[in-house]
Amino acid sequence: MSYAGDLTPAQAWEKIETGAVLVDVRTAGEWTHIGIPDISALGSDPVFIAWSFATGELNPDFLTQLGAAVGPQTPVVLLCRSGARSVAAAQAATAGGYTAFNVLEGFEGAPDTYGDRVINGWKNRHLPWK
């Protein structure tokens, strides 16, 4: 593993509670139409930096944008839809000098046999979102 580790959504919440920054690496369309994590109860807001765009093209400015939002001394918890893009983002952040964690299951979780994302993930584990 080339990053600090994988966290369940509940463990991610705990890591954020102790000072890590939540970085949502989904696309702008996902933030707008699906929802976002609500960590206001922890006195914080997520940072939104797309790992890739709706076209599938990687964000060439990801590390620059991360550096502008979070100093490398602060651990980051990376979240995507299902926990796949956030692995790549965690690897890149680690290569950029961060202590980076991936959120297993992501925001929406894995699809069921019908393609609906109702099995697991941040939302389905009943963590706050809006």
Image (spheres, helix red, strand yellow):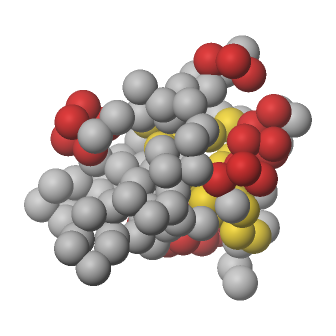
Residue 60: x %, y % from top left: 33, 57
The C terminus lies in which quarter of the figure? top left
Q: Quadrant for residue 58, please give it.
A: bottom left
Instruction: Judge whether residue 11 can be spotted in this image.
Output: yes
x 16%, y 55%: residue: 54
Q: Quadrant for residue 6, please give it.
A: bottom right
Residue 126: x %, y % from top left: 57, 41
> In this rendering, is residue 17 above or below 101?
above
> In this rendering, is residue 121 above or below 19?
below
Front one among 48 and 38: 38
Instruction: Judge whether residue 92 can be spotted in this image.
Output: no
x 51%, y 57%: residue: 121
Image position of 12 (left or right of 93)? right
x 33%, y 71%: residue: 111
The N terminus lies in which quarter of the figure? bottom right
State the residue lying farthest toward the bottom: 1
x 72%, y 62%: residue: 7
Residue 106: x %, y % from top left: 50, 58
Image position of 43 (left or right of 67)? right
